[in-house]
Every structure is written in C-alpha cells, then in structure tokens.
Image (tube, rainbow, N blue to C red):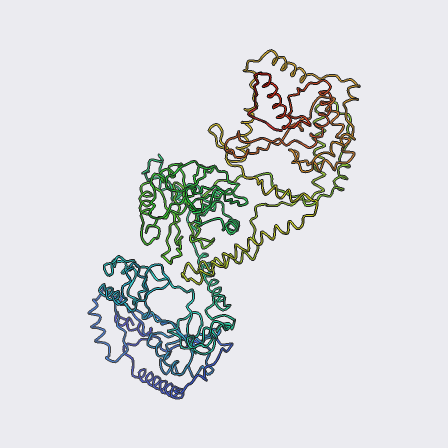
C-alpha cells in the first residue's frame, strides 16, 4: 500500500517515539505507569524528610560514576522539509486540524530553540552512606534530570537546568551537608579598572556619572597599592570592554579603561580554606586560616607570635602560603594537564604545504629607494630544510652586570646562536665574558650613572664583522655576516624621545638584507598594544612606506612593575629576511622584559680542525719501548732527499709512539655548566614568573625576586667553591698558582675581522690567507726591479753560487764540527718544558723522553745536515701565530706580531749548529759590537747604556750624532 505525503509524515513521527494521535490503550498504559511511579517516589521522599548529615560520610573507595537516565526520550524537534510545496501557515493549519488539544504533538518550525546550558556542578564534600535513599530524595524533588560523578574525595552532582540546580542546593543546605559550587553564568559579573581620575572624586559621583552613560554598575571600589588613583568597577555580564572604550570622559576628565586581571592562579575559599572555589559559593564548615580550627579567621584568638597550622596540610604555616605542598601539587597537576593538552593539539597539526614554485611577492614593486629590486619578506625560494637555522633572541636586560650567570645557562640550554641585548647599563670598565661567544658592546658613556647601552653576543664559530654606522638617537651595535645579512641590536629611549627616521634610514639602507631587533619603546595597535605612542606611529608609517616587515609575538614582552597594562615593544624589523619560526616571547631570564626568540635561515658555520685536548695520562715507559721497536738506525745519509726522508720518518715514529701510549680526552672550555640545584631554582623562578605575569599577584612577584637573589648567590658560591677546591690541591713548591694567575690576567680573546686593501676577512681561512699575503708583501724586497749597488750585486751572486754548489769537506773539518750523542743529550736536557710545539706537534717533553737509540739516529741526521750543508725541509716549516699588539686596532694586519713556532727537533739541530757558528764568529770577529740582537749576554739595557755613553762622549767633543730606529719587526 502506497503512502501519500501526509501519511509518510505520520510514519516518521511514530518511529521517532512521538505519536501525534495516541490510541486510548497507549494513553491509559502510560498514564497508569506514571501515576504508580509518582506514588512510589512520593512515599520514598516522605521517609527522607528528616534526612540529616549522619547519612553523609567521608570517602568510600570502589565506587564508579552513576548516571540516572530517563526512560522517555525528550521531544524531537523537526524542521519542515516540504517548505517549497506548501507555506508555513498552511502546514500549521493542517497540524492544528489533525492534533488533539491535549496531545503531545511537536509541530515543525523553522525557528531553532536555544538550548539552556548546564549549570556548574555542585561538589559535595565526601560521600553518602545511603546513596540510594538520597537519590530517591532528589528524584522526588527534581526528577531524573541530573547525573552523579564520584571523584577521589567528593561527590559531583550535575543538573540540567538552573531551577534544578537551585533546588539541589536548598536540599543540601536543609540537611546541613557540606558542599560548594560555582557562580552561575547568568549571575556572573565583569570587573574593569578605571584610571585617570586623579582628583579622587567620591565613589557615588563616579557611579552616577557611569549610570548616565547607560552602564549598569553593581559596585565600585578604591584599589589599593597603586601608584596613581584607580577604581575597580563591577558590572553585569552585558558590559564589555568594547562598550567601555567608547566612554572617553567621566566627570569631564579624560579616563582610560583596563581589564581587571585576576590576582590568583587558584581562588582560595576564605571559609573552608580550600583552593579552587570562592567563599560566596561555599557551604562547608568554617576553618581558620591561622590555626585550622573550626571557626572563622576573624574569630581566631592566636596572634603573630604563635605557631600557625595549615588547614590543608597541617604544616607550620598559614593556609594561604604558596609553599604549601597541597598548593604546589595543585599547580603541578594543572601544568601537567596543560602540557598534555598542548601535546595533543600539536600532534593534530597539519603538515604545511610546500612553498609555491612562483613567488607571488615578485609582482610587487618596491616603494623605497634603498633597493632596485622588490623585497621578499614572506616567502623564500629556498626550502627551509636546505639551510641551517639560527636561533636568536632579543632581550632588554635592564642591567646585565648581575645577570651573566643566568644568561650563560640560558644560552647553553636553549642553544642560542645570537642574542641582541638592550639596556645593558654597563660602564666601559665592566667586563662581560661568555665562553664560546664573542661580545660586541656599545655602552652609553655620556651619562652620570650606568644606563642604556646595547650589546650583541654571537657565537665564535659564526663568521662576522662589525658594522661602522653612526646614529643620532638610536643606540645600536651591528654585525655583518658572510651572506651579507646585517643584524642590528638597538635601543630607543622611551617617551618623550621619538624614533628618528634618519637613523632608521641608515640602518635599513646599510644592506639589501637587514634584521633589526631590540626595545623600540614603540606602541601601536597593529602589534597588540592598547594604544599607540609617537614612536609607534613613526615606526608604523616608516614600515608601510619602505616595505619593512614588523615581526612581533602574540604575547606581551614588557610587564611593568607598576601594575600597568603589559605591552609589546620588543620587535623585529625584517628587510628581505624570512623569519622561519617565531617570534615567541618566553618567561625566562631576569628582567621586566621577556626574551623574544626567532629562527632565520643561516649560513654554514666554520669548523675548526684543531680541537682542545688534554693529556690525561702518558705511559712514558711504553712510549720508550715503542720508540726502540720502531726506530731504525741509518748512518749512511748521502743525499739531500735521503736526509729529508729520514727526518719525516723520525718525526712520524715519535708521534706514533706518543699517540699509542697516551690517553686523550676532548674537553670543552666553554661549557657554561651549572649545578642541578641552580637549574631547579631557575625552573621554579620561571614558573613563578609566568604566574605573576598572568595574575599580577605581588606574592608571586616577591617569591620570584627572592629566587633570583638565591640563584645569583648560589652561582657565586659554586664558583668560589670551585676555585677554593682548585687552590687547595696546589702543593707547596708548585708553580701552578703562577700559571693560573697568568691565564686569568692574559685571557686570549677571539680574533675579529681583518681588513686589508678593501677586503674584509671573516672566516679563519680568509684571515690566514690575508695575513699570509700581508707578511709576504712586507718581506718582498723586489730585487729584480730595484737599482742595486755593486756591493749588493756581489753579495747576491755569492749567495746564489754557494746555494747551487756542493762544497767538499775534508776529514779535519768534519772531526771538529760533527756532533755526538752526548752533546745532543746535553742540548735536549736544557730545553724548556712549557714551550708550544711546532707544526709537527712534538713537545719538548716528548723530546726529553727520547731513548738512547732515538738520540743516536737524531745525531746522525744532524751530522748529515752539517756534511751536506742542507737544513732539512721539514724543519724549515713553522706555524705562524699572529699575536695582537696591545691597545691597537685589531682590524689592521700591521697590528699583529707574527710568532713562528718551529719543531723541537729543529731547535736541537739549530743549537748545535749555532754553537759552531759562534765559535767561528768570535774567532774571526765577524759580528759588529753594535749588534745586540740574537746574541747571548746582550741585553737591551746594555744597548741603551752604550748609546747614552756614545751621546755624552760626542756631546763633550762637540760632534754631531744621529740615531736611527727600526719601525717594523718580524720576531721568530
């Protein structure tokens, strides 16, 4: 049988358990069941009329959640799916005609009924011993529209509407059952802070003025502990911040509105002293804040001299102490829940789509005169995975001198590559050193006390050079990286100082790629500030005109100590620079500013091949045994090639024997490590800092300040203990103390950039090549293009003749000039222990531990050097170390003194050969008496004494005397 449209609607309604025309049988059966059920519930309710708190007791284990459901489903709301076929009025007439007056018919309507939100839960403290009787009591009063959930200590009752919520509370109050709940959404209020009324008017006058502005005022309070007068205005939940922003004047006075920030992480009840609910919604037995007894705090008889007791943990402190274990456990649980929720949300994030093949920003035209090509600030043609990332931050330190210990730990923990610091408040005499980093500073020198100033701290393995840009008002320090990226750390003084556009032009126009970061003290709504200031207006206009991207975090960066509204004034300006991650503001370090972190595509770092190693232990007996096994005596060295080969072989055998008998461990002198105790204090301090920034509770501010002081003292204490332990280990007679003092006084500073002939060297290889070219040009005599005298030509010809010829030596000459193993041992014995090795890395201590067999082979090599009149080529190679001259510009190559480190074996041979030369020199009197350099027992003081004597003698004789000085030196 086919159904028509109207018949089909009836079938659907029947399937949905809603019968527009119920039969008489169904009607009777349903009515009888409901009547019987109501009679049963009324009888149960009558037995529970005198229910008291004896039926309600403490926690009971093993209970699970219980849900009481209603048998009949709620009415089903249906929409008219046949609206195009008939109008709404026609359908309503049809439904009215077919439905009985008293039937439960749900008429289709296009208007959706707003569902009432569930009221807050009612938390019963403990459990009901006879839960079934209490359930029957509730069902008799409100029906089955509620659910029950058992927790570890409480019974939670959830109702479906406000009427039932109020009824359940009345039942619990009547039976004297302890419980608490929360304010219903309809009864909640909003609180705002009113500032600007410094004339301190009466509260009634303020309320009347606000009422004329159609603001429903519930109450007004005077706020305490504020620098300027402020008023807390409590309104109903219909008043919003957007509506209040339209009210600019009150009592003919310019005013400002601010949101009231809750001063507590967890609200504490002043009745039962538990955390998590307010006093107005608590109906538990009172507990004293001081002594934990069952009376109100204002009725407590104890005074400040008595020992308090906590009502939550029974400890010797008041119940509102944030060091209470119960409170800390609640904080940790909330933090763990927040972390777990964030981890779940992070896992659900989608993978970002790859960048488009064609950059849409190429369609833009540049509006600035700094570049001829359009800027690309949002995307980059190179994928992020192909380039290494640099982690860098900006931070207003608000005085850096006392915060270097915490800064070192933060740089090490977060693996920061570059940090731009403003307001360092350092004097030029203050020293800031961080292991593994190079510090560039621009201190404010025109102030009576230390203030302002900027610094830029960058890792040593990042090649860079400092910029030479001078600004008028903005304090700045900048570096230039290898990829021509200019990075500036800046600080702009607050109002009335205003950003100077010519300074921004200099910084942004210094290169094609520029990144500027620091405290601009610029406010504007575009970067989440409540209002703008003159510097913010200038910065916004300048960025729009010059295609500069202003990067800012979503969180505030400055939290003033005077309880003013937090602002975002620590910013990044990016010109043709893509920020791949961030900015993020984190509650780390000690300042009223939070550090702001970003990541940018970076250049490859330079790797240094020479790493610091420490000889842990050398088995010299094993070293000597290995040498005797490897060394082979060869006394038949007849050619120059054989001589160089024997020197290479001897060098390699000594190094191999030493490596096999020595245990080496790599040490990093730039660990900046701290103890676990300090790290725990820092984590706790950061947690209190985050809470204070969120709540502005002065109690957390005080705890944060105290922890910062403890951290500084602990770091200083550990540093002193480390030095005390090191000094106590020094035995009498050791010169270790002298060495430590020398290291501390003469710390080796990292080598900066070097400039020569319009070339700037940044990497180690570039610096080495530039210095090598400079030293080569200094000692290039250019003899081919110079006019030489006859004497000079004669010397050159004789030198070339001797070099290209091999003289024949007689046996008498050999017997007088050849060395012996005993002489070699005497020379080795006088070698100093602490001299740096040469390019072969053979130290003097290794030479002093040579075996007799090795010394014999060395003496054969030295004799072959004398016979062949050829100094071995491996011994001619030296490691040149440039040492900066004191108080000189290190960017100029002429301000470095080159020191050559030769092989220790070559020094033994040189000493033996030099003894022969000095013997012939003293016999033939070749060296002039005026020469004092490179001569034994000839000191500089003696040379000065000789010159003074010559001047006095010639002055007495009325003779003219001239003196010349060598301006450049090359020391070996």
Q: Nearer the viewer, residue 902 or 422?
A: 422
Q: Is residue 666 above or below residue 160?
A: above
**For the point 41% across and 62% down, which residue is it?**
697
Horizontally, residue 819 falls left or right of residue 715, namely right
Q: Is residue 24 above or below residue 796?
A: below
> Percent from the top left, x then y, of residue 705?
47, 58
> Percent from the top left, x then y, of residue 134?
42, 82
Q: Is residue 663 visible?
A: yes
Q: How many marks?
A: 0
> Percent from the top left, x then y, of residue 360?
35, 42
**For the point 64% across and 21% down, which residue is it?**
930
Q: Nearer the viewer, residue 381 or 394?
A: 394
Horizontally, residue 84 falls left or right of residue 912, namely left
Instruction: Residue at the far top: name it.
Output: 790
Q: Quadrant of the N terminus?
A: bottom left
Image quadrant where residue 636 sits: top right
Horizontally, residue 655 falls left or right of residue 424, namely right
> Percent from the top left, x then y, of residue 73?
35, 75
Q: Is residue 642 visible?
A: no
**For the point 67% across and 32% down, which residue is it?**
903
Q: Nearer the viewer, residue 235 or 561?
A: 561
Q: Is residue 760 above or below residue 2?
A: above
Q: Quadrant of the C terminus?
A: top right
Q: Is residue 933 above or below residue 804?
A: below
């Amino acid at each position: 049988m086919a159904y028509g449209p109207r018949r089909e609607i009836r079938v659907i309604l029947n399937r949905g358990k809603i019968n527009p025309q119920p039969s008489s049988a169904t009607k009777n059966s349903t009515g009888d069941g409901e009547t019987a059920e109501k009679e049963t519930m009324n009888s149960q309710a009558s037995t529970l009329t005198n229910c008291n708190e004896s039926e309600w007791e403490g926690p009971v284990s093993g209970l699970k959640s219980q849900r009481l459901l209603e048998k009949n489903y709620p009415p089903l709301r249906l929409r008219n799916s046949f609206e195009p076929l008939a109008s709404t009025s026609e359908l309503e007439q049809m439904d009215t005609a077919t439905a009985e007056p008293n039937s439960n018919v749900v008429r289709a309507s296009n208007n959706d009924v707003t569902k009432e939100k569930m009221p807050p839960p009612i938390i019963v403290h403990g459990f009901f011993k006879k839960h079934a009787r209490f359930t029957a009591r509730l069902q008799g009063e409100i029906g089955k529209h509620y659910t029950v959930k058992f927790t570890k200590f409480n019974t939670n009752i959830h109702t479906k509407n406000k009427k039932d919520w109020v009824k359940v509370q009345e039942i619990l109050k009547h039976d004297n059952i302890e419980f608490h709940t929360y304010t219903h959404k309809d009864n909640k209020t909003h609180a705002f802070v009113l500032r600007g009324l410094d004339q301190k008017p009466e509260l009634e006058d303020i309320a009347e003025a606000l009422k004329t502005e159609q603001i429903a005022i519930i109450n007004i309070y005077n706020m305490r502990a504020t620098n300027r007068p402020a008023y807390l205005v409590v309104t109903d939940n219909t008043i919003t911040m957007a509506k209040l922003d339209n009210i600019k004047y009150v009592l003919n006075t310019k005013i400002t509105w601010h949101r009231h920030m809750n001063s507590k992480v967890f609200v504490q009840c002043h009745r039962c002293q538990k955390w998590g609910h307010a006093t107005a919604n608590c109906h538990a037995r009172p507990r004293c804040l001081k002594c934990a007894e069952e009376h109100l705090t204002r009725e407590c008889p104890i005074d400040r001299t008595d020992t308090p007791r906590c009502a939550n943990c029974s400890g010797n402190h008041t119940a509102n102490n944030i060091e209470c274990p119960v409170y800390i456990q609640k904080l940790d649980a909330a933090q763990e829940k927040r972390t777990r929720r964030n981890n779940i949300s992070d896992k659900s994030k989608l993978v970002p789509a790859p960048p488009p093949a064609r950059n849409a920003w190429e369609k833009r035209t540049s509006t600035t005169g700094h570049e001829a090509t359009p800027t690309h600030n949002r995307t980059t043609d190179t994928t992020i995975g192909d380039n290494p990332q640099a982690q860098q931050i900006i931070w207003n330190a608000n005085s850096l001198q006392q915060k270097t210990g915490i800064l070192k730990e933060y740089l090490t923990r977060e693996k920061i590559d570059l940090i731009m610091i403003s307001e360092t408040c350092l004097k030029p005499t203050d020293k800031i050193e961080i292991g593994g980093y190079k510090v560039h500073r621009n201190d404010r020198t025109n102030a009576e006390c230390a203030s302002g100033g900027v610094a830029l701290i960058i890792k040593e393995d990042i090649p860079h050079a400092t910029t030479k840009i001078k600004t008028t008002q903005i304090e700045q320090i900048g570096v230039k990286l290898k990829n021509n990226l200019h990075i500036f750390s800046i600080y702009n003084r607050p109002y009335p100082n205003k950003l100077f556009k010519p300074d921004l032009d200099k910084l942004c126009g210094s290169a094609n790629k520029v990144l500027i970061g620091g405290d601009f003290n610029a406010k504007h709504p575009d970067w989440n500030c409540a209002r703008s200031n003159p510097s913010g207006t200038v910065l916004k206009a300048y960025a729009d005109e010059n295609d500069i991207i202003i990067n800012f975090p979503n969180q505030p960066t400055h939290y003033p100590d005077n309880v003013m509204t937090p602002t975002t004034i620590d910013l990044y300006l990016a010109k043709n620079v893509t920020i791949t991650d961030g900015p993020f503001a984190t509650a780390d370090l000690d300042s009223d500013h939070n550090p702001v972190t970003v990541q940018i595509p970076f250049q490859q770092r330079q790797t240094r091949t020479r790493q610091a190693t420490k000889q842990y232990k050398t088995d010299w007996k094993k070293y000597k045994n290995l040498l005797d096994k490897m060394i082979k005596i060869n006394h038949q060295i007849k050619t120059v090639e054989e001589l160089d080969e024997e020197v290479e072989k001897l060098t390699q055998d000594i190094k191999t024997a030493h490596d096999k008998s020595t245990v080496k461990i790599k040490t990093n002198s730039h660990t900046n490590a701290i103890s676990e105790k300090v790290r725990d204090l820092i984590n706790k301090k950061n947690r209190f800092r985050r809470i204070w920034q969120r709540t502005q509770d002065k109690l957390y501010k005080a705890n944060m300040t105290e922890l910062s002081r403890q951290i500084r003292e602990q770091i200083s204490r550990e540093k002193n203990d480390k030095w005390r332990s090191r000094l106590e280990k020094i035995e009498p007679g050791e010169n270790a103390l002298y060495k430590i003092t020398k290291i501390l006084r003469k710390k080796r500073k990292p080598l900066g950039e070097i400039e020569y002939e319009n070339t700037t060297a940044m990497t180690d290889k570039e610096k080495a090549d530039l210095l090598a070219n400079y030293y080569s040009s200094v000692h290039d005599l250019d003899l081919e293009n110079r006019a030489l005298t006859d004497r000079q030509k004669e010397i050159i010809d004789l030198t070339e003749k001797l070099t290209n010829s091999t003289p024949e030596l007689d046996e008498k000459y050999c017997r007088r000039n050849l060395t012996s193993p005993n002489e070699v041992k005497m020379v080795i014995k006088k070698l100093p222990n602490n001299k740096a090795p040469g390019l072969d890395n053979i130290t003097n201590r290794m030479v002093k531990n040579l075996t007799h067999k090795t010394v014999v082979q060395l003496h054969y090599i030295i004799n072959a050097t004398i016979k062949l009149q050829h100094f071995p080529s491996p011994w001619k190679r030296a490691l040149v170390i440039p040492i900066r001259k004191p108080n000189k510009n290190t960017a100029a190559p002429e301000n470095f003194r080159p020191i050559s480190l030769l092989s220790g074996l070559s020094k033994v041979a040189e000493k033996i050969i030099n003894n022969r030369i000095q013997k012939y020199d003293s016999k033939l009197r070749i060296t002039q008496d005026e020469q004092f350099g490179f001569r034994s027992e000839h000191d500089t003081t003696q040379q000065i004494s000789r010159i003074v004597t010559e001047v006095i003698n010639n002055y007495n004789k009325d003779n003219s005397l001239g003196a010349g000085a060598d301006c450049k030196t090359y020391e070996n």
